[in-house]
Amino acid sequence: MKNLIIDAIPDSPYYPGVNFDAATGICEMTGESYMEEAYKFYAPLLNWLKEYSLQEGNDVTFSIKLTYFNTNSSRLLLDMFDILKKSKDAGHQVQINWYFETDDPDIKDEIEDFEIETGLKIKLIPVE
Amino acid sequence: MLDTNFSNSIICYHGPINIDLISFFSNFLKQHLKANTIVVGRIYKVLIELIQNVSYYSVDQFNIERKFGSGIGWFRLDEEEKIFKITTGNKILKEHGPVLQKNSNEINSLDEESLRELKRKTRSQANKRDIGAHIGLIQTGLITGNSLDLEIEPIDTIYSYFIITAKVNKS
């Protein structure tokens, strides 16, 4: 299975950078996410994650380093977490790390809402 | 309609709105607005949510072939003594007015925990191709902690004008 890499583009900061590594299972999203028609951007990410995470022996470390995401993107992030929940329920190791800026007072509630909705535990990692 | 008193206005724009314009204005304000980091961050988030609603759902579109993300409308950011006010305006179908009013009344009536619960419910049930304007308004209510102010003015038998104001506290 190939890696999924989408480089962040400074002129289009509404697209996040994506680096899903098939060799290590480390999947990372960086930057911001508030593009138009978010489902089109997220479709290949969801497909990759579904294919990779449900294969025997494939564990996932999912690292989110998004400094902003709009509600449209949050709907798609929820779909990603649902895939990871299925993978975890199937017996795979799933670790989700969320790197958050300490000057964002609202992000912890957002992450907690994802935990409530998915039943997954998300590790909070503060970034100064 | 658009209040033409600009004495407290930091920025005001009327015209076609696409994602590049939203990104430009929101990042410009993020870099140059004189307020503390938390307040600037909240204005940034609210601005994007509300302007994207204009871009997506205004019935006036500047690129009819795209059908999405090319709405015409306006937005402004005003500074008052204790708050920043983010206001947007756009034309809507008259039949959508009562729904927007009902949704906003519900958002304004709920405490934070109930609003979070409504957000989770709305998000999980939303169509991923178009999650609708409702969740953006819920998120705006959550971020600001203040009520949303709505004005819906009939234009004719088919259209109304929709204006929404969100208020971000300075402290």
Image (cartoon, rainbow, N blue to C red):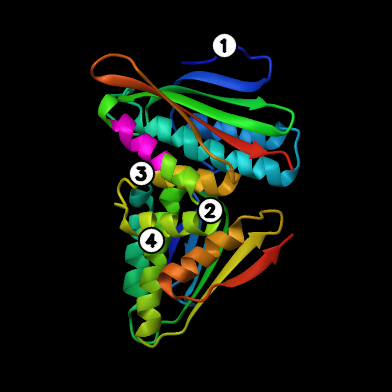
Number of labels in the image equals 4
Q: CA distance from mark 3 to mark 2?
A: 31 Å
Where does residue B68 sit, x and y in percent of width and height?
Answer: 32, 34
Chain under callout 4? A
- Read off the magenta span: B96-104
Using the rendered view, name the quadrant where residue A57 is placed.
Answer: bottom left
Residue ID for mark 4: A45
Residue ID for mark 1: B4
Chain under callout 3? A
Q: Residues within 10 Å of mark 4 (few under 14, many from 20)?
A: many
Element marked by disc 3: loop
Where does residue B40 sit, x and y in percent of width and height?
Answer: 68, 40
Q: Residues within 10 Å of mark 3 (few under 14, many from 20)?
A: some
Residue ID for mark 2: B111
- Both on one chain, marks 1 and 2? yes
In the image, B160 versus B34, the foreground residue is: B160
Query: Magenta stretch: residue B103 in it?
Result: yes
Q: CA distance from mark 1 to mark 2?
A: 34 Å
- Closest to the camera, between mark 3 and mark 2, is 2
Query: Marks 3 and 4: CB-CB under 8 Å?
Result: no
Q: CA distance from mark 3 to mark 4?
A: 14 Å
**Residue A100 in the image: above or below residue A92:** above
Element marked by disc 2: loop
- Residue at x 35% of width, y 66% of height: A48
